[in-house]
Structure formats: C-alpha cells, structure tokens
Amino acid sequence: MAKFEKRILLFILSISLMLFLGVLAFLRNVKQSQQITRYIANSYEIIAEAQSLLSLLKEVESMQRGYIITGLNIYLEEYQDIIDNVNKHNDKLVVLTKNNSVQQDKVFLLKPLINQRISRLNEGIKIFKNQGFEITKEFLSNGQGRSIMKKIQQNIHELEQKENDQINNYEKTLIIIDNQTTFILIFVTTISLTFLCLIIFANHRYIISRDALEFKLNELVIKDELTKLYNRREMNRLLEAEISRCQRNNQNFCFVLVDLDHFKSINDNYGHLMGDKVLQDIAQIILTEIRVVDSAARFGGEEIAIILPNINASQAFSLVERIRKNLAKIQFISTQSNDSFFVTFSAGISEFKPESIMTNIIDSADKALYQAKSQGRNCTILALN
C-alpha cells in the first residue's frame, strides 16, 4: 500500500511538474506574442508617420504651386503651420526608430533633405514676390526641387519597405508561436482537465485582444483620427479602385470635394476644440446622409472628399445640395461662450468618365470648389467635363 501511495504521489508530482512547465511555456509564448505585437504596432505607427510626413510635404508643394499660379495669399495661410507639422512628424519618427539604428539613420537623412526641399519652396515664393512669374518659372524648371523630392520619397519608400518586411517577419514568428501555444494547450489539457477551462479562456482572451489590436492598428492606418473618416491615403486607394471598376464596366461615378466656409474664423472665435467638434459632427452628418456604397474621407484640413459610385452628376448634385441645406439649418453651440453659430460649406463635383484619369477628376472637383468659393461660398458647383 505504501509503495502504491508512493507511486501515486510520484505520479501526482510528475503531473504537477509537467503542468507547471506547460503553463510556464504558455505564459512565455504569450509574453513573446505581446512583445512582437508591440513591435508590429510600432512598425505600423512608423509607416503612418512617414506617410503623413510625405502627404504634408506634398500639400506644402501644392500650396506653393497654387500661390505662384494664382498669386492668391489664401494658399499661404496655413503654409508655415503645415511645415511645422512636417518637422513634428520627422521628430516623431526619430523617437519611434530609437531602437533600430538602421531605420533611424534613414530618418536622420530625411531631415536635411526636407530642409532643402522647404528652402527651395520658400525661395520660389520669394522670387515670385520680387521678380514675377516668368523668373519663378525658370527657377522651378531646373529640376532641383523634383530631384530632392524624389530622394525624400525614395528614403521614405525604403523606410516603409523595411518596416513592412519586419511586420511580415513578426507575423511569421507569431504563427510559429501560435502553433507552439496550441501544442502546449493540448499537452496541458491531457495532463489536467481541471485547468482546461482556464487555459481555453486565457487563450481565447489572448486571440481576441490580438485581433482587436490588429483591427485598431488597421483603423489607424486607414482612418483619420479626428473625424473617423477615411484618411487621404485610403481615399486615394478607394478612388483608384473605383476608377478601375468603372473603366472595366464603362460606367461613370462622381467625386465631390467639400470645404467648410470660413472654418478658420470658427477656430479663432470659439477655439480649436470647438473647431474639432464641428469637424467631427459634420463628418457624422455626411456619413448619415450618403449611401452605404459611398465613401467619405478627410482630404486635408477642413476639406472632405466623397466618392459616389453608380451615380450621375445630376443625382450627385441633388445629394450634395440636400446635405448642404440640412447642415445650414443646424445650430452649433460654443462650449466656451454658449454662443450659437451656423456652418456652411462649398462643394465642387466632377463626374468621372472612363477616359478620365485620377488627377483629372480631383483637379476638376477642386476647380469647381474654387468656383463655388469665388461665387460667395455656401453653394455647389458642377465641373464642366
């Protein structure tokens, strides 16, 4: 009997030791998975920051071109603010790549290139102010600015490619760890059914939290943080996809650019927090009014872009006008002063034809939007295709 009890005790001790080792291995894998998930999150954030930096730099270029072509100071109102944001994104990249010297070296190379590009842009504006359009045109035609921008784009592309490679490697490692974790769970389950529910629950929570984090990371990449609309990069992707679809099927669709009227005065009079709330509310109004198949994105600042598939210019005009008129009736209340005010917008609509290209449809909508502003704002203009 004593020998049997000793065997039972030895068996229990062996089972307990295997259970302990199994749980220990499981916890180790979970910790590794969490660490790798953080690395993936960091890589996604680096990609998002790099894309935002490049997008803002292109926006600065567009402002300079708009000013030189039209001579209107409105193009320079937010010029310096956006340049400051470019530098902030570059500084953020330095912080995010602090544990990767190779990537940080690429980020350090970006700073002088960005400074050179901004210096060229500023020099072009200065020449235009002092010597006129023709001299400025000659200055811009030497290609130095484009060459610098190409280097910046190449640097950012290499940075993003490296991060994407790291993400792929991390995800492969996660698959291996997941397979190991599954084996450990089966092993531990065969040892002790007592711990079965606990282990399944822990693994289930782990998978759900990882999926939720991946979903959140994906949202960060494609959505604008403030308005929860798509960001400009995702809008470009959706627009390219819609163009391809319509070209294949020989169909038309409409593209809309909406710009809030006198939005700067809202920030000046009621504060930037109120301005942010107005943007959020209007974004939700637009999402409520458009169809499920439509897409809305924050195009930049107070501009919102809308893609309207399978709709003609007349139908798009009616839809945008309905949104504009409904918005004009809504009374906003300042959270600081309790003052009430109304918000209107100007809109430009362009209709895509199968022979069009992406640049044409955006440019047409932008010109129609500019015409709407020129006619006193708070109206919708159809582009003449």
Image (tube, rainbow, N blue to C red):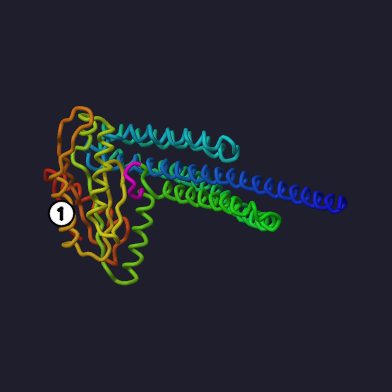
Q: Pick whichever, 112 or 302, lies toward us.
A: 302
**Residue beneath label 1, please?**
322
In this rendering, the answer to whether 310 lies above or below 366 is: below
Looking at the image, residue 133 sits to the left or right of residue 174; the answer is: left
Query: In the image, what residue occupies the spot 40% across and 41% down?
Result: 145
User: From this viewpoint, which residue is outermost toward the bottom?
Assistant: 249
Indicate the position of residue 49 as horizontal and vertical percent values: 45, 41
In this rendering, the answer to whether 296 lies above or below 331 is: below
User: From this viewpoint, which residue is outermost toward the top?
Assistant: 337
Element type at marker 1? Answer: helix
Query: In the image, what residue occupies the spot 36% across and 58% down?
Result: 238
Indicate the position of residue 213 as horizontal and vertical percent values: 49, 47
Whether residue 99 appears in magenta in the rendering, the answer is: no
Three-letter amino acid code of the residue under disc 1: Arg
Query: In the image, what residue occupies the spot 18% across and 41% down?
Result: 261
Q: Can residue 147 be seen from the camera position used here?
A: no
Q: Pick whichever, 126 or 269, lies toward us.
A: 269
Whether residue 230 appears in magenta in the rendering, the answer is: yes
Looking at the image, residue 42 sits to the left or right of residue 189; the answer is: left
**Magenta stretch, residue numbers:** 226-231
User: From this viewpoint, which residue is outermost toward the front?
Assistant: 1
Q: Can residue 223 be seen from the camera position used here?
A: yes
Indicate the position of residue 220 as horizontal and vertical percent values: 42, 46
Q: Pick whichever, 221 or 52, lies toward us.
A: 221
Quick one: label 1, few (<14), some, or many (20+) residues within 10 Å?
few
In this rendering, the answer to whether 210 lies above or below 384 is: above
Report which quarter residue 56 is drawn in.
top left
Report which quarter residue 183 is drawn in.
bottom right
Image quarter (top left, top right, bottom left or bottom right) of the C terminus: bottom left
